[in-house]
Image: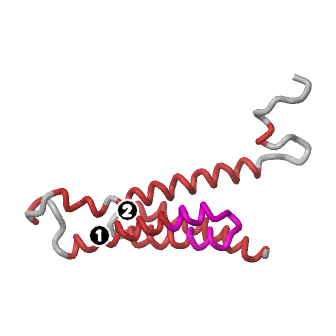
Amino acid sequence: MKARKTWSRILVVVGGIAMVAGTLDPLEGSVVILAGSGLVALGTYLGDTGRSLLVYWIWVLLLIAVGVGAMFGLSAIGGFGGSSRRSMWWGVPILPYPVGWIMGIVSLSTRLVKSLRQGLSFPNEPSSRFLFTRSPDE
């Protein structure tokens, strides 16, 4: 069971790095972002994070896959706007790609903050979740 949790963390970290690194070039990096979101979804599946987070990451993966597929499809037929004589509205099918990416980055950021808060609590001091609660003698 410990190996499964270790692999889960490795996949989530590597996938998160891929999702951030892919933004350097949004067109060619979209494949890296898609693979990264797939790794994070797989890592979420392997970990004991709960069903709701797994469903969330499946949605992120599907949104990114649909948007990237639309982007490559539009690129294959010559794009939109400019000299292609297609209106800018042809770009609407690409919108799931940035929406899914933003959802993924927000989720990864909250996971990072939660793990840092848990890692910063010391054995002889109260954990961070008790910092904002009242003590019984107040």
Dot 1 amino acid type: Ala
Q: Splitting the image into 4 quarters, where does residue 72 fall?
A: bottom left
Q: Are marks 2 and 1 in contact (CB under 8 Å)?
A: yes
**Residue 27 among those drawn in magenta:** no
Q: Would you say the magenta stretch is mainly helix, strand or loop? A: helix
- Counting from the top left corner in percent of width and height, residue 35 is at 47, 73
Q: Which residue is drawn at 21% across and 76% down?
A: 76
Helix, strand or loop at mark 1 = helix
Q: Does the magenta stretch include residue 52?
A: yes
Disc 2 residue type (three-letter):
Tyr
Q: In this view, does 92 lie to the left or right of 39?
A: left
Sort mark 1 into few (<14), some (14-19) or many (20+) by Cα contacts within 10 Å: many
Instruction: Give the structural element (helix, strand or loop) at label 2.
Output: helix
**For residue 122, above or below residue 76:** above
> Where's residue 31, x and y in %?
40, 72
Colour option used: secondary structure
Q: How far apart are marks 2 and 1 (CA)?
A: 9 Å
Specify the segment rendered in magenta: 40-58
**Where residue 137 sits: x, y (%)?**
91, 25
Residue lying at 57% horizontally and 52% vertically, measured from the top left? 109
Residue position for label 2 = 97
Q: Which of marks 2 and 1 is nearer the N terminus?
A: 1
Between 125 and 68, the one lying in front of the other is: 68
Instruction: Give the quadrant of residue 12.
Output: bottom right
- Residue that numbered label 1 is attached to: 70
